[in-house]
């Protein structure tokens, strides 16, 4: 798709410096851009590429306009404007309306005529599918699922019984939503399965990355609120609640019955134990272990950064005797160090809230 | 399904306080319960909801019976009794016996008449499937697999050649069991693949969470013993053995040739390096790195808990010079700190046991 | 398959001690080996099984030949020779050429006559598939994908639009390659999706483990170079580049736009933040967090090893006040500890390189 710069300025209500008749048709980085491309400057580390860029137009803050050798679209939030322009130039692929003959759809489902059910998909009984929904190739949608208008399951997604997904939510391949939570009662050394009778409710405008798993509730539902963004390979336990606008990076694990607030940012590979409450506006840096509720907004960390291994091992050896060293150096210290945390494997009794 | 309290007391051999004619039909938390529901008290943190619950009956220990405002079923292990009652009220959905016409079943398989092969499934050659087995929609079962009676593959499960799964074992969507282990020999800078000629043997009454992966053995089999419970997104390397009744929370990684004992409890996101032995009755808290064999039962940890980032960073900066500080403060210390651990990327030579 | 020892010695150019007419047909560990099997000694920890092995022949270094009670094939790199012999004895299973009638192949694809498209597969439009390629059961190959000669997708693999995979590359079940990267712009508290318009390019001789995910580039491609070996459940963000011959163990997460050099070895569950550069020949031990670029070859670590929990907690409690203790013990210390690292959740602005 080709768009003139003047049209972009009008459509997105921003100021243009340069020729309104010039046209762009694709996006590119400042460094790699050539004629016909739109680029942007949103991260200071790439400013060094601005002066030599060959982009047709660059989206940037007004304060950088002077440095721009080419046309510029001025925006207070260049990355957000870039996202809008890029969506205009690169719209998501369309799927044809209708049910592919190789798919298997149970009787009694309600499927909007504008919806697309791809090849090799399976739709079980009592499923309700809204307008313009896309169920991509190889998806399995179990009985009782509800997909609101404009939901897209890209491919190879599996939804368990009774999962409900809100409007415009996008689910990437390999996701499993609504599998049983991890709940077992120990009875004299053997495990008894605790039925997982809740479901999963997912809001509007959510995005869920590839191979992420969200378990159904033990009793009551697991809930993902509106505009939550989940990266790949995240594991969300039963009865977790994630507040609106929260974004979670890849490989995070959240144990059962934990509640996370709104507008949180959670870095990659963070682990959060069960039955905790994390308030709104918390930021957690990568690989942190959260073993207590976080009751104040702020930034939290617990992962040591990489060191040359020989040095790290020496320090780790000292860490191993830190308390002993402290007591010796203070001629006693406190007889009983406070127990700062008490994580525990979250494998039973998750069902009771 | 509706059941009278008197019937529950008789069936499960427990004492009832209250009207034996009262009936329940679903489960609920103490807090959310209404008439017709059974709840339970197994975790002290929910005791505050007991006095005001509107459940028809609560399962609890005799010592809490006095506080219960409604009928009570008394049990020494309320959570185990709850699991049994909930299973009675919410039995797993039934799958119809027979082979769905959209599935592809190779000639020469042995499939019990009571088994259910769902839509879009693939069963390759020489597969043996027992009574009442469920192979859900979209599953791929490669050649030579054996599924004993009452195995259930919920949906979208992939089983590699020759995998054997014991009775009543339940496998959730997205699991891959029997892919090649990670074995390569380095030859002058390039990698040569080491054929993974073992298989995977899984016992009875195992449960395997969504998107968990269990690799086939390099030589000899990877073994999961009876009544092991695995949560979602666990990675189990080739030739690992996991002892009976062990439960492992989500996102754990276990490298090749490690052996884990019976009745262990392993918290979320734990990492265990290869070629180790962990004895029976070990508990490992979340995010711990196990880099040496654990030869004594007990509880093990290694993850620091989350702190406010500014404080954590200051302490991490001190950690970075811990050995230097120690030596300075002790006028020398030991010249060579003991090397406390020696983890290494587990990427070759895994095949030899 | 059965092979005589003399034939092995000739074929692989190594010295044989023993009867060239003796034959082997399978591989086994030193401990479990019986007649007809070939074993090997490559790891000192298994040397104790050498003297009593019942293998027909053992592959080992010349310096161990004297201890070998049976025939021996001598090699400077026994594990590499073992890999070659094992591949000869246990070749990968063959898939029949042709398109299975249950698969769905769009018009306009180019599929070599020698390729195998398995049951229930989906091949969308404009896909090009080379000689002897195997697309296993249940795979989904989206439009514009290119699979060079001898690529094998074992089963249940999902490839997004425009993914390109080089010769002989092997992809295990559950992998998702080419899903959207995690890119969102925050606009007044709500997230705007940043279109992910790049693709994924994977080189020759790569192996990718089960349930691993590799995201498409935001702008420009995500690149995996030749002979890279990836274990299971790895997450690779958009625009990452991984250099040739690098091997990565399971559960690793690599955030967007990070570049990793050649011949690196990365242990399990390592987390690497975005926009970093890691040079060639770096080794990173398991569970390490890499939050800064690594500019020198060497071994890096940051995970503490497991301790008995009571001891660990006491030390963790001291760690919590390490800076305070340091300042007290040095009567002041530096007023402002250096900020040693600055990890941040990698959830926006990843698109600009």
Image (cartoon, coloured by chain):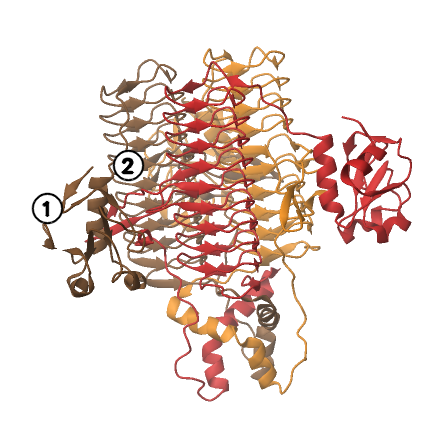
Chain colours: A red, B brown, C orange
Picture residue at 68% right of the left edge, 38% below the top: C218
* Vertical arrangement, residue C131 with respect to residue A309, above or below: above
Picture residue at 33% right of the left edge, 55% below the top: B265
Side of C326 relative to A178 (left or right): right
- Between tags 1 and 2, which lies in front? 1
Q: Position of residue C188 (x, y in %)?
A: 67, 51
The residue indicated by pointer 2 is B169
Q: Is residue A222 visible?
A: yes
Picture residue at 59% right of the left edge, 16% below the top: C131
The residue indicated by pointer 1 is B21
Question: Which class describes the residues within 10 Å of circle 1: few (<14), some (14-19), or many (20+)?
Answer: few
Q: Position of residue C293 (x, y in %)?
A: 68, 54
Q: Nearer the viewer, residue B273 or A278?
A: A278
Alpha-carbon span between mark 1 and mark 2: 36 Å
Element at label 1: loop
Q: Quadrant of residue C314?
A: bottom left
Q: Is residue B255 visible?
A: no
Side of A82 relative to B221 (left or right): right
Q: Position of residue C28 (x, y in %)?
A: 38, 35
């Amino acid at each position: 798709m080709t768009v003139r710069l003047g049209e972009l300025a009008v459509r997105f209500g921003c100021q243009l410096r340069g020729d309104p008749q010039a046209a762009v048709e694709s996006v590119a980085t400042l460094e790699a851009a050539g004629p016909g491309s739109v680029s942007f400057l949103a991260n200071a580390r790439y400013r060094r590429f601005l002066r030599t860029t060959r982009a047709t137009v660059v989206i940037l803050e007004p304060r950088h306009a002077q440095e721009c050798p080419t046309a510029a679209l001025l925006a207070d939030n260049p990355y957000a404007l870039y996202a809008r322009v890029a969506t205009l130039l690169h719209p998501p692929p369309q799927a044809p309306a209708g049910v592919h003959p190789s798919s298997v759809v149970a009787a009694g489902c309600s499927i909007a005529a504008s919806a697309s059910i791809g090849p090799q998909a399976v739709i079980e009984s009592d499923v309700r599918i809204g307008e313009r929904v896309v169920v991509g190739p190889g998806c399995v949608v179990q009985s009782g699922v509800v997909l609101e208008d404009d939901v897209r399951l890209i491919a190879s997604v599996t939804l368990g019984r009774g999962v409900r997904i809100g409007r415009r939510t996008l689910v990437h391949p390999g996701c499993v939503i609504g599998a049983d939570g991890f709940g077992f009662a120990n009875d004299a050394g053997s495990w008894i399965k605790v039925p997982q009778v809740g479901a999963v409710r997912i809001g509007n405008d959510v995005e869920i990355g590839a191979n992420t798993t969200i378990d159904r509730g033990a009793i009551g539902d697991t809930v993902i609120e509106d505009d939550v963004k989940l990266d790949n390979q995240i594991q969300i336990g039963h009865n977790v609640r994630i507040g609106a606008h929260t974004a979670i990076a890849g490989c995070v694990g959240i144990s059962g019955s934990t509640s996370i607030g709104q507008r949180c940012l959670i870095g990659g590979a963070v682990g959060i134990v069960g039955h905790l409450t994390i308030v709104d506006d918390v930021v957690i840096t990568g690989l942190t272990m959260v073993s207590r509720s976080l009751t104040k907004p702020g930034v939290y960390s617990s992962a040591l950064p990489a060191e040359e291994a020989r040095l790290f091992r020496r320090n780790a050896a000292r860490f191993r005797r830190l308390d002993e060293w402290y007591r010796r150096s203070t001629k006693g210290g406190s007889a009983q160090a406070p127990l700062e945390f008490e994580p525990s494997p979250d494998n039973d009794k998750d069902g009771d809230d």
